[in-house]
Image (spheres, rainbow, N blue to C red):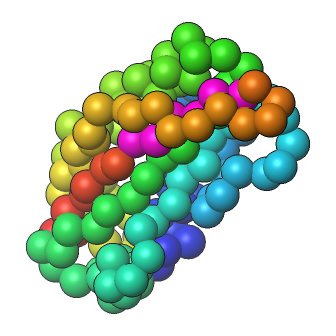
Amino acid sequence: MIEEFYDWIIAEINTNLSVDVYAPQLPIETGKAVAVRVEAGDTIDKLCQAESYSEVRFTVITRDANNRGSIALAESIKNLISNRYNVSLTSYTISSINGDVPLFTDVDENNQVYYNTLYRMNIG
């Protein structure tokens, strides 16, 4: 069931924002990209079991060549998937998705800028 979530969110971001999306981590290569990762621990179990009314946390990491590009990408993704309701997948329904403010995370050795946004979705 976690694969079903990854398939949905990757398609949603890729189709609407035309950016490469990976799960659960970014590739080493440089360039604009997004990674989606479900938080470890019981969160994955909740998603795999599609427990009704469970809160599942996931993170979206954006990377771009500069600060402006990375934060713009993070905010575009937040506008796309935050405040979504009743998203029907094959095995379960996501009753809501809400995201926090994107936070600056890092600049790597290639001067690429990373932002991290935490999301909470409810299965129900």
User: Quarter of the image holding residue 66?
Assistant: top right
Q: Position of residue 108 (x, y in %)?
A: 72, 36
The magenta span reads 112-117
Residue 26 part of the magenta-drawn span: no
Residue 114 part of the magenta-drawn span: yes
Regarding residue 84, the answer to whether it shows in the image is: no
- List the single residue furthest toward the top: 68
Q: Nearer the viewer, residue 113 or 12?
A: 113
* Image side of residue 20 versus residue 4, left or right: right
Regarding residue 53, the answer to whether it shows in the image is: yes
* Image side of residue 95 versus residue 92, left or right: left
Q: Nearer the viewer, residue 98 or 115?
A: 115
* Image side of residue 31 versus residue 49, left or right: right
Q: Position of residue 110 (x, y in %)?
A: 82, 30
Relative to 34, say whether 42 is above or below. below
Residue drawn at (28%, 67%), measured in percent from left and top? 56
Q: Nearer the viewer, residue 58 or 123?
A: 58
In which quadrant of the rendered image does the C terminus lie?
A: bottom left
- List the single residue furthest toward the right: 29
Residue drawn at (79%, 51%), measured in percent from left and top? 27
Name the chief secondary structure element in magenta. Answer: strand
Relative to 26, say whether 89 is above or below. below
User: Quarter of the image holding residue 112?
Assistant: top right
Residue drawn at (31%, 50%), measured in percent from left and top? 119
* Image side of residue 19 versus residue 97, left or right: right
Q: Position of residue 107 (x, y in %)?
A: 65, 32
Relative to 122, say whether 43 is above or below. below
The image shows a total of numbered marks equal to: 0
Q: Position of residue 11 (x, y in %)?
A: 58, 45
User: Quarter of the image holding residue 46?
Assistant: bottom left
Relative to 46, say whether 56 is above or below. above
